[in-house]
Image: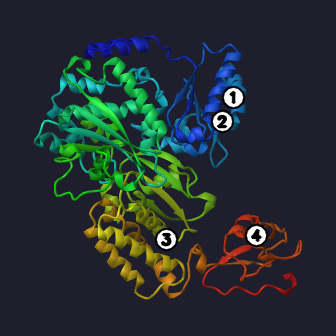
Amino acid sequence: MPRLRSVADLEALRRDILARRDPNQPCVAVCSGTGCKAYASEKVVEALEAELAGRGLSERVAVRRMGCHGYCERGPVVQVFPEEICYFRVQPGDVPEIVRTTLEDGGVVERLLFEDAGGERRVHENDIPFYKHQNRIVFGINKRISPYSIEDYIAIGGYGALAKALSEMTPEQVIEEVKRANLRGRGGAGFPAGRKWETTRNAPGDEKYVIVNADEGDPGAYMDRSILEGNPHGVLEGLLIGGYAIGAREGFVYVRQEYPMAVDNLEIAMDQMRELGLLGEDILGTGFSFEVTIHRGAGAFVSGESSALMSAIEGRVGEPRPKYVRTSIRGLRDKPSNLNNVETWANVPLIIDRGADWFAGIGTEGSKGTKIFSLVGKVNNTGLVEVPMGMTLRKIIFEIGGGIREGKKFKAVQTGGPSGGVIPDEMLDLPVDFDELTRVGSMMGSGGMIVMDEDTCMVDVAKYFLEFLADESCGKCVPCREGITQMLHILDRLCAGEGRPGDVDTLEDLADTVQVASLCALGQSAPNPVLSSIRYFRDEYEAHVADRRCPARVCKALTAYWIDPERCIGCGKCRRNCPVEAISGEKKQPHAIDQALCTKCDTCFQVCPARVSAVTKLSGEPVPEAPAATAG
């Protein structure tokens, strides 16, 4: 492709690309995000290419590798265009039927369609509950372009926002547009992006930097990963616009080591940009020059913090530093530096292209636009969802997520990752935005959303997140290093049945100290899981201390397993699977567990047939004696 030397050249290339494409050409789009690749979507692509070649259809039907579609648990996801027929859990063996039934005969393969709870099959994406309640202004681009094709991105208007900013707007006007849109940082804190940009632009010095934070260390969160893998151009375009507005000539993308495909797709995108002249010197003939460097992080959770991340880019240990001077004034190489996360940068081209009023028309008064969440846990439909700010937890969990698995009762949802808080069922109608989540003791974070059911122990949940944070603390400051460790010791004792009177009050006191005195956001937010779970589930904490009981029957030391002789049918599954031979009983006779041998591994509970449910968990209740007839 020829080098683009002006905005007019970019528009001419866009017209040429569109002229060469038939919008009605049949196309099979296969999700090639990490989730679907784990389900062998690449083999589906290979099978499609071979089948089409064998039937002489290769010239008529296109096969495209696209980015993540979000409905990850039902991968591999395949869409047939222009009809937009959605197929799920497609295997290579399904390909001949798809080609024959859909591409040749114009029908649908019923068994590969989405089936709702009432047994009705849905053909199109907009009819599927998981998709139809979303507003995918950022993430929806993934299904429209291949991450390996800059032509795809240009065809849908890509780099038009950059051209507009460079040719029609001053840097101050770009910043003002972002400020009017009230774009708040999607990385967790929710600080207004435009104000941060303005601070960096006005900071003294000619050398400035813009940085993409793609560290994304929250367990179970992969929103940024999927954006980078599926639409690296959108993030890079946002970064260039930010560089122009702030006065930077160099940018960095800090990507965690565990994201190799994101790095590969970024490198491909950057090579294509350089070939067209969209990266490097004198971009689009406007005099603006800009370069991007990819830095691979070592995987430390704390390196997602701004000053720690910049220290890592400099080649030093990724540890935070005191912020009496902000990184927007003195950051990377002691120069003014602006850091935003992947999703924030991806929103920038949309704001410049469509205008601040359009963006501000989505969301709530204080939180504009949409937010991508990683919806996981005990919910029927897991994956990545993008919703307008202000949508309620109830709608996200029950209409998009399809409710709780196995018909169990919803108990709580954890938002904001390991540094977030738990929100109980009485707050299901809470609008999800930055301010509302903070008000109830949680946070937006990067967008993790873990759903928990009635079988979840909230003390155990707090312990799980504190274990993660204790391990990830850099140890530089005493309040974080020692405070989190001491809180974890108390939680360990509670779950082990060794709680003491006053332990809950001590947890709250320690949490307050860690919040106030820690050096960086990791320590300052670490107590959130503990404080929020105590706030809404204090009775569970008290039960662990006063009654030596785990109401959810999760904590092993406080739980015993018993086989109900009235329910047991003597199938022998529990006895055969018990790893320590603690279960005895004759065939078709009630079985029994030797409590002295039982290691509480939960195997018997898992393998007992659901229609029988003879294995019962007890906590705080005496274990009934086994009938003598079942012994031996």
Q: Are marks 2 and 1 in contact (CB under 8 Å)?
A: yes
Bin the neighbour count of mark 4 within 10 Å (Cα to Cα): few under 14, some 14-19, many 20 and up: some
Q: Residue placed at 15% from the left, 45% from the top?
A: 199
**Label 2 vs 4, first from the N-terminus:** 2
Disc 2: which residue? 90
Name above or below for residue 12 compared with residue 387. Answer: above
Q: Amino acid at mark 2?
A: Val
- List x then y, in percent, for residue 117: 63, 49
Report the amino acid beneath label 4: Cys
- Cα distance in 3D space between marks 2 and 4: 36 Å
- From the image, tell me which residue sits under label 1: 95
Camera-side mark, 2 or 4: 4
- Circle on res. 578: 4
Comparing 11 with 222, the one in front is 222
**Label 1 sits on what residue type?**
Val
- Which of disc 3 and disc 1 is earlier in sequence? 1
